[in-house]
Image: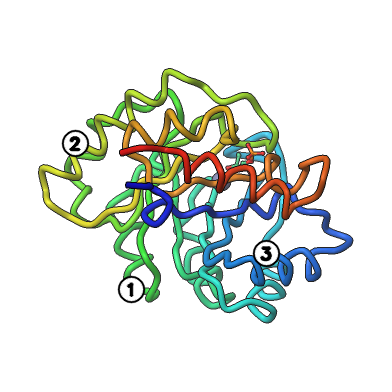
Amino acid sequence: MSNMSRIQIAPSILAADFTRLGEQISQLDALGIETYHFDVMDGHFVPNISMGIPVLEALRSITKARLDVHLMVSEPERYIQAFANAGADIISIHWEATPNVHRALQMIREAGCKVGLAVNPHTPAFVLRDVITMLDLINVMTVNPGFGGQTFIPSVASKIARLRAMVGDVRQDIDIEADGGVGTETAQSVIQAGANVLVIGTAIFRHPEGLAAGLRAIQQVLASEIV
Ligand code: DX5
Ligand code: ZN
């Protein structure tokens, strides 16, 4: 059986051509994309600054797809409501970004969004144990957060497998997302470990033959994946 149906591809807007963002989103919408990943960086939690609320609002106005907002910001509690108002469907905060993870997760739920928690490559799986039942999504960073186009860190696959087992123990329907350096060479290892959402920036948007070819190349890998 093919894995294609149970694996979601979430293109990462960070790698888009911002001079043609609307056009690229329409193109991907037409190719059946149902989730976009939106990276917010504050120059403090991570050493880079990306995009924020006005860009999310613009995106919300042009697509019906799910918007998966990844907050790579310190004290994310300060911004949850604003991103929910701007059109986020899912908000992920980082475990490393606040001492009040539980409160921040509650705030996401109260704001009416799906609840996500992201973990850096060095953060062990077990720290999620006492909040796992609050989650709809776990974002496992497969690069250090802060930049697109980085090299996938292979050792993170075993953490994905541990998290998939933890999710199975609480018998909840929680998505596990692999984020960073995912492409045709690395998709298979994260899927085999138990990820079911692939965040893909560079491999789609920067494909030498264009984003449709980039998406097709990933879909071919998924189609050939045997369970
Ligand atoms: C990295 C971001 C990723 C990034 C993925 O800090 O969280 O979402 O955009 O992009 P690629 O696929 O280029 O690694
Ligand atoms: Zn991300």
Give percent across and percent down for residue 226. 36, 37
Q: Give the residue type that dot 3 points to.
A: Leu
The numbered mark, 3 or 1, whose residue comes first in the sequence reads 3
The numbered mark, 1 or 2, whose residue comes first in the sequence reads 1
Per the image, the residue denoted by label 2 is: 165
Q: Is residue 167 left or right of residue 113?
A: left
The residue carrying pointer 2 sits among few (fewer than 14), some (14 to 19) or many (20 or more) residues within 10 Å by Cα, namely some
Q: Secondary structure at mark 1?
A: helix
* Viewer-nearest of discs 2 and 3: 3
Q: Secondary structure at mark 2?
A: helix
* Viewer-nearest of discs 1 and 2: 2
The verdict on label 2 being within 8 Å of ligand 2 is no
Residue at (56% x, 25% y) in the render: 152
Residue 28: image tag: 3
Q: CA distance from mark 1 to mark 2?
A: 28 Å
The numbered mark, 2 or 3, whose residue comes first in the sequence reads 3
Q: CA distance from mark 2 to mark 3?
A: 33 Å
Q: Give the residue type that dot 2 points to.
A: Ala
Looking at this view, name the residue that lies furthest to the bottom: 61
Q: Is residue 192 left or right of residue 142?
A: left
| Marks 3 & 1, CB-CB < 8 Å contact | no
Give percent across and percent down for residue 101. 33, 48
